[in-house]
Amino acid sequence: MSAGKKLRLGVNIDHVATVRNARGGAYPDPLRAARLAQEAGADGITAHLREDRRHISDADIDGLMEVLTVPLNFEMAATEEMQRIALRHKPHAVCIVPEKREERTTEGGLEVAREENRLAHFIAPLREAGCRVSIFIAADKRQIEAAHRIGAEVIELHTGAYCDAHAEGHVEARDRELAALREMSAYAHSLGLEVHAGHGLNYETVQPVAAFPEVMELNIGHFLIGESIFRGLGPAIAEMRRLMDEARG
């Protein structure tokens, strides 16, 4: 596996559904957002079907599988229900994420090392069905090695701690988190894992991560949906694409 190829952008459309669900109607439509994202240069669409269905719905996943011309990255908890849904749809990629009902957003990476046996058995049918299995984890050597052992093809490194430190002006913590992301991207790549990254990235924080040659894909959602209020979804994505390409170039 070679590093340094064009960096892919996956656009997470969850929070279009959040706005829709605030009024209980059908607008704004996440499928329309997905089509606009494709046109604006997204290389894939990410959607997280949560157990409580707080944003993306089962019908949204059905629709995305029908209309997308780019790959769908289906984020899901490691539950039997979500496994059944994934096996029915067989999306291009399945990303296993930690999930707690009370959290506002995904907090930290999946604890793979402690649940290695269960997760190995959980992802095996997904791999057999042809889905690329990704594990959302912290930039931690122990978790990366466990993800590799259970048969994941991809890891997605959680960039939230880095982004939070930047937002709070904690320069030393930001630089420490960024160094860990850099080191663990290289380590995961050396094991043969494809490396993705995401969570909390915005125009200010994306370029240092995009510059890592081992990172092949960034998944960005909340910021782009928020920025689209001010500049439109297409231009918001186009600017993110420009910054990523500039950093990689």
Image (spheres, rainbow, N blue to C red):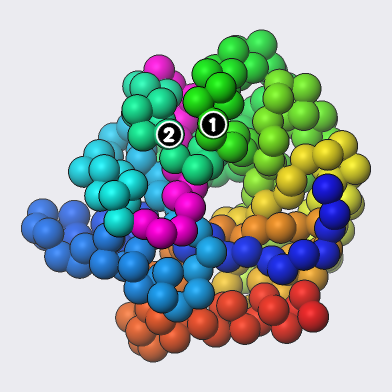
Does residue 88 appear left or right of residue 245 in this picture? left
Q: Which residues, given as a range, are shown in magenta?
A: 68-80
Q: CA distance from mark 2 to mark 1?
A: 7 Å
Query: Does 77 lie within the magenta span?
Result: yes
Query: Does 12 lie within the magenta span?
Result: no
Occupied quadrant, residue 233: bottom left
Q: Secondary structure at mark 1?
A: loop
Horizontal and vertical percent position of residue 95: 54, 39
> Could you tell me which residue is drawn at 69 percent across and 35 percent down?
153
Report crowding for label 2: few under 14, some 14 to 19, many 20 or more residues within 10 A (C-alpha): many
Horizontal and vertical percent position of residue 229: 33, 81
Horizontal and vertical percent position of residue 87: 41, 26
Report crowding for label 1: few under 14, some 14 to 19, many 20 or more residues within 10 A (C-alpha): few
Q: Which mark is residue 90?
A: 2
Asked if residue 59 shows in the view, the reply is: yes
**CB within 8 Å, label 2 to label 1:** yes
Provide the residue designation for mark 1: 130
User: Which quarter of the rendered picture does the C terminus lie within?
Assistant: bottom right
Occupied quadrant, residue 34: bottom left
> Could you tell me which residue is drawn at 29 percent across and 35 percent down?
52
The image shows residue 4, relative to residue 161, as above or below, that is below
> Could you tell me which residue is drawn at 61 percent across and 56 percent down?
198
Q: Nearer the viewer, residue 100 or 247?
A: 247
Does residue 82 appear left or right of residue 165 in this picture? left
